Image: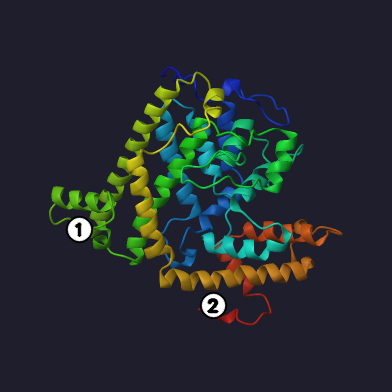
Amino acid sequence: MSAPRVLAPYASHPEESRGRLYPQEDSATRTVFQRDRDRIIHTTAFRRLQYKTQVFVTHEGDHYRTRLTHSIEVAQIARSVARALDLDEDLAEAIALAHDLGHTPFGHGGEAALDEAMAPYGGFDHNEQTFRILTDLERPYAGFDGLNLTWETLEGTVKHNGPLIHGALTNETGAGPSSVPQSVAAFSERWDLELSSYAGPEAQVAALADDIAYNNHDVDDGLRAGLFQVADFDDVPLVGTIFAEVRQDHPGIEEARLIKEAVRRLIGRMVNDLLAEARDRLDRAGARSVGEIRALGAPVVAFSAEMGKNGRALKDFLFERMYRHDKVNRKTEQVQDVVRQLFAHYLAKPEALPAGWQAAEADQRTAARRVADYIAGMTDRFALEEVRKLPLDGTQRLKK
């Protein structure tokens, strides 16, 4: 048996965890962060990710990424990076596996439609929904609602993209401070999540692992769907260079293998850049505890300036050539109609909700949130099945 890994002083040490909101006896065989990871994996919300898609609707093909396969890819990258930086792998993995639990069916198009429908009632945001799932909506335990995760996992999930409050702080993209979702603010009043600081380093790793996985699998899926061609990347920094390198190293390579090899190399370049930049920042910070990492006022896990520029160029390409593609836009419009119709139906007829989702004497805001919770939990295929049962005009075209 190999000796236990020695974590860096600035890592999140499980034996120093701030614990759980509801005290529970420790496990004899797993650390607190390993238990958090396992609790997330066993949720209903996690299983549903198998039939929630990123860009394409599930019935369009079996080889496109789903929210589940994406989450697994993010977790793999996060574990590898955390291990290389002597951080706690299990905490990084737990946050990575949880980060997409709150997504609606039909990707960002579905979320936009639900946010629009919920505008009079406080709006909808998938990050807040993830937090609601972890702290309230999942109810597998007799003594409390939610999963009763550790403070570190909840903090990392909420702040993996940076602080939620503090006017002087901005995230890596230069965006300004964001507002605090109501459910997060209410929870933080009970158990302070320190919303004005950056999260621990494991959460920062999970956030950038998400970026790496997202950009690279969208390249793969977009090419598979025929939304663009390999040659279209010629002028995209780094990506075009890597495709050219693969062709030079392997003359006459078949395109399917060319794409896989290029994506593999691109992930490797991004990970290695991230590790080099993080090590440099950590050395300069000289932090001796995870608390000092949180107090720095800037992330310690980041891409270099050059890689950040390359990443933004790739995002711009994908936004124009993939997310705004006519094929994707047509499908987005259709599935947004599904979400709108379901929301209007359930809000007007709350008795149509399953018994466990009906709230006695609920005000309109509470009723709307119940409906949003129910729809957000749907898979793509279940939402399509449900809308076809509704006596509404325009649903027949969804059967095509």
The disc placed on residue 399 is 2
Residue at the image position 72 percent from the left and 39 percent from the top = 187
**Where in the figure is residue 250, as x and y percent of width and height?**
15, 50
Task: Look at the image and tell me in which quarter the N terminus lies.
Answer: top left
**Can residue 84 be seen in this snapshot?**
no
Task: Name the residue located 20 percent from the left edge and 58 percent from the top edge.
Answer: 254
Res 167 → quadrant:
top right
- Residue 254's tag is 1
**One can see residue 267 in this view:** yes
Q: Helix, strand or loop at disc 2?
A: helix
Type of amino acid at the residue the image marks with label 2: Lys
Residue 266 spot, x, y in % from top left = 30, 46
Q: Measured from the top left, where is residue 56 in percent x and y?
A: 46, 64
Residue extending farthest to the right is 361
Q: Quadrant of residue 77?
A: top left
Front in this rendered view, residue 383 or 111:
111
Give the answer, above or below, for where 314 lies relative to 186. below
Specify whether 189 is left or right of 175.
Answer: right
Q: Is residue 285 left or right of residue 130?
A: left
1 or 2: tag closer to the N-terminus: 1
Q: Which amino acid is tagged 1?
A: Glu
- Closest to the observer: 328 or 75? 328
